Amino acid sequence: MDANEIIERRACISGIGQSDIARRLNRDPLELTLDACLAAIDDAGLKVEDIDGLSTYPGLGGPVGFSGAGAVSVHDALRLELDWYDSGIETSGQLGSVIKACLAVAAGLASHVLCFRSVWEGSAQGEKGRSAVMPGGDGRGASRAPSGFMEWTLPFSAPSAAIWVSMFAKRHFHLYGTTREQLAQIAINARANAAHNPKAIYTEPMTLDDYFAARMISEPFCLFDCDVPCDGATAFVISRIERAADLRHPPIRVEAVGTALHGRPSWDQFDDLSTMGTRDAGAHLWRRTDLKPSDVDLAELYDGFSFLTLSWLEGLGLCPVGESGPFVEDGKRIARDGVLPLNTNGGQLSGGRLHGYGYLHEAVVQLRGDGGARQIAKSNPQVAIAAAGGGNTCGCMLLTRE
């Protein structure tokens, strides 16, 4: 192998699949997971016996509802014969599991890796809301003593990322003059796009007045700045590029990935609270390609909270540092007919919290030209970015059409 080779270019996305998605489906989460996995395998034009690798995030770790199935369950249910598999929560954002699959096929450990991510947070919460599955909520999320920085936040009833990420947002507001009116455009744009996504959770129109009328969650975040817990699963088949030539769809190539983290691996002690790991992962991605931010036709950027999207816009160089607020102001640049269509499926703010995988799925849909009513206005898009994560766990992928 050439030491200078960008090895992720040996990999491609050959198949995608999703289960039903809804606020609450009250279906077995493994069943949802298998629906998505089998759909992805079929979409690639493969059979279950062709799958020789498996990768997922986060496995069975985390609070109730945070994961619908682990690697072992899917391995056994599909009777897979695997040459490589991986699972775990400590990785480069939720897309880290896909990035590792790319590296596995590039290294020759497998030819077709099935990647999946499933959630059932909507059903797990029931009618009680997020506190039902939070550490320190009703107790289900706190089975053992907290560790790490949670030792210092949980005693002050601050277990939610809404509280941690709001610190970053407030610092950005202070340094660069970012406003809630600008932040609102992330949510309003997501809702406009979700209206054209038949699987989206919330599709009714949203105005700026609607946004400001919503209850405050953690300053500066109101309800519409926070993602929507739901039930659903998303899956991909990552194939070695030479093995994908005769499959059902032209492969979506992996041009480059970004996985770096140079700041402290801490939500509350990062070296610059106006940015996040987006800064390091974004810079890493562009070091691995000759393409430039100006070549990107669409961006599917994490919006677990609206500010995270602003952080990714800056971290990926899609706008200058400190200028993400003016960049999204009035929403025209980020609309489906704008210069940088953003979160075209409604993101997690309106489409549903599929936790990272939803962005990559939508990027492939758009590059294939299969977006239907939500397809971006630019004809024949060639380059897309999918990015997931925030704080100290971030990963991103640059995709090109074959």
Image: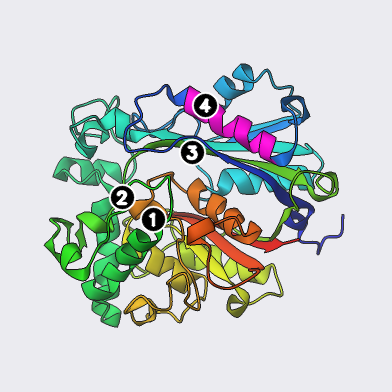
Image position of 79 with respect to 262: above or below: above
Mark 1 and mark 4: Cα distance apart in space:
29 Å
Image position of 190 with respect to 58: above or below: below
Measuring from the top left, give residue 11's x and y in whole percent: 75, 51
In which quadrant will I find the N terminus? bottom right
Q: Which residues are magenta?
A: 31-43
> Would residue 27 appear left or right of 238 to someone viewing this image?
left
Local crowd size for mark 3, using a 10 Å CA cut-off: few (<14), some (14–19), many (≥20) = some
Q: Earlier in the sequence, mark 2 or mark 3?
A: 3
Amino acid at circle 4: Gly
Residue carrying label 2: 202
For the residue labelled by badge 3, is the local secondary structure a helix, a strand or a loop?
A: loop
Local crowd size for mark 4, using a 10 Å CA cut-off: few (<14), some (14–19), many (≥20) = many
Q: Earlier in the sequence, mark 3 or mark 1?
A: 3
Q: Earlier in the sequence, mark 2 or mark 1?
A: 1
Mark 4 and mark 2: Cα distance apart in space:
28 Å
Q: Earlier in the sequence, mark 3 or mark 4?
A: 4
- Mark 4–mark 2 contact, CB under 8 Å? no
Residue visible at 71% across and 75% down?
290
98 or 50: nearer the viewer: 50
Measuring from the top left, give residue 8's x and y in whole percent: 73, 55
30 or 394: nearer the viewer: 30
Amino acid at circle 2: Tyr
* Residue 41 belongs to the span the image colors magenta: yes
